[in-house]
Image: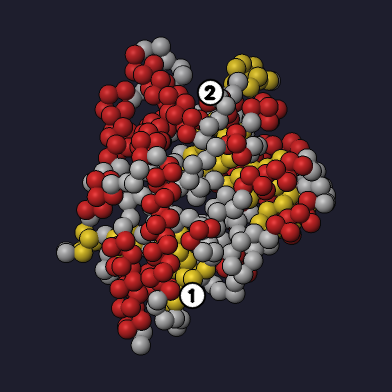
Amino acid sequence: MSLNIKEIRKDFPILERETRPGVRVTYLDSTATSQKPVQVIEAMNDYYRHSNANIHRGVHTLAEEATSMYEGAREKIAKFVNASSSREIIYTRNTTESINLVAYSWARANLKAGDLVILTEMEHHSNLVPWQMLQAERSIELDFISVTEDGLLDLETYKSLLSRRPKLVSFTHMSNVLGTINPAAEIIRLGHEVGAIVLVDGAQSVPHLSVDVQALDADFYAFSAHKMCGPTGIGALYGKSALLEAMPPFLGGGDMIKEVKLRSFRANSLPHKFEAGTPAIAEAIGFGAAVDYLSALGMDNVAAHEHEITEYALERLEEIPGVKLFGPSADKKGGVAAFTLEGVHPHDVAQILDRDGIAVRAGHHCAQPLHEKFGIPATSRASFYLYNTKEEVDLLVNGLYKVKEMFG
């Protein structure tokens, strides 16, 4: 089934926005954050209007409604990624916090000086800095799967690193710069063969691909609502229940306890053990509504549409003299086109495009080491989602020709 993009676009009010009179927004920055459909906005609004109360603690009607909506969203999220139980879905603020939860709880309980953690050269800072902090604290070792010139992971490097018996492998399922969709199942399988625990950064994959954490056999899988039509300020960590059960709590306070005495406490059961304090209740409900929205469309349909747009965008961008694209071919990547334009700084490109309402990202995209790998300080990045059209790609290309003309 192909998506009816014209009808889908009606669900996103912001796409009618004019950035200045007569200039409608062309939003090509969904890798940074996606836009939100009315179904998500209204679900959160409905909670605040009709059921606003704290969860888990009250027995009155509003509290019970809020709790049901909050936990109902967790059930939806678990089903969306095929977790075996909703107990394996921990609410966090975002992918970054999910990765930090693993670093602070699992890693600090299990890693010691000299233990090896394998990462990749294409990681977002969220999957680099927590491990660098742990390295400074515990003297663990970090090593990296190299990235080839065409933007793929060098799996021969990975196999060589595995001979050193790593304790943890942590990698991005899909690069936020190159768009590369990494062979997650193979990377996980190879890591498990040498006894490693494997964490996957799914910030860019869950919004765009059909993800099955059980089929992948991931130990931990992190993702965010705001990149998949949901609100900001909430994400999720999937973890195998045996691992989560054995981990110490991440934060202390209310709701994460079964019993507290003046000199001791007993932690709550999963998933509440890792959810201290009043959570982002409305955001969780919005997260659930986003999952409903994507599920109704079908993730295979979303992926197929994005592939069509991305393939067209790469073809059009390659026509422009002076444009250099980064990352693999369209069949190996998601909806991302990172590029440079000869003689023009990426920030200038983005600023000039913005005059025509075209929103792209410019900078290192929280992946400085990857840009250093390619010998560049920054790129411009256009990214595509379920509401983008080929006509918007044409507007981007026309805008880039204007940039070239302006800079001679």
**Furthest-front residue in this view:** 1
**Furthest-top residue in this view:** 59
Q: Is residue 212 left or right of residue 312?
A: right
The three-letter code of the residue at mark 1 reads Lys
The three-letter code of the residue at mark 2 reads Asp
Viewer-proximal residue among 408 and 278: 408
Query: Can you tell which mark lies on residue 301?
Result: none
Give the image location of residue 202, x and y in percent.
Answer: 54, 46
The earlier-in-sequence mark between 2 and 1 is 2
User: Is the residue marked by circle 2 packed among few (<14), some (14-19), or many (20+) residues within 10 Å?
Assistant: many
10 vs 295: above or below:
below
Task: Point out the image quarter for the N terminus.
Answer: top left
Residue at 53%, 26% in the rendered image: 86
**Furthest-left residue in this view:** 21
Residue 263: quadrant of the picture: top right
Instruction: Name the front one of labels 2 and 1.
Output: 1
Q: Which residue is mark 1?
A: 324
Q: Is residue 184 left or right of residue 55?
A: right
Regarding residue 72, the answer to whether it shows in the image is yes
Query: SS for tag 2?
Result: loop
Contact (Cβ within 8 Å) of mark 2 with mark 1: no
Task: Point out the image quarter for the C terminus.
Answer: bottom left
Residue at 26%, 59% in the rendered image: 25
Residue at 83%, 51% in the rendered image: 164
User: Is the residue marked by circle 1 packed among few (<14), some (14-19), or many (20+) residues within 10 Å?
Assistant: some
Q: Which residue is mark 2?
A: 255
Give the image location of residue 300, x and y in percent.
Answer: 43, 43
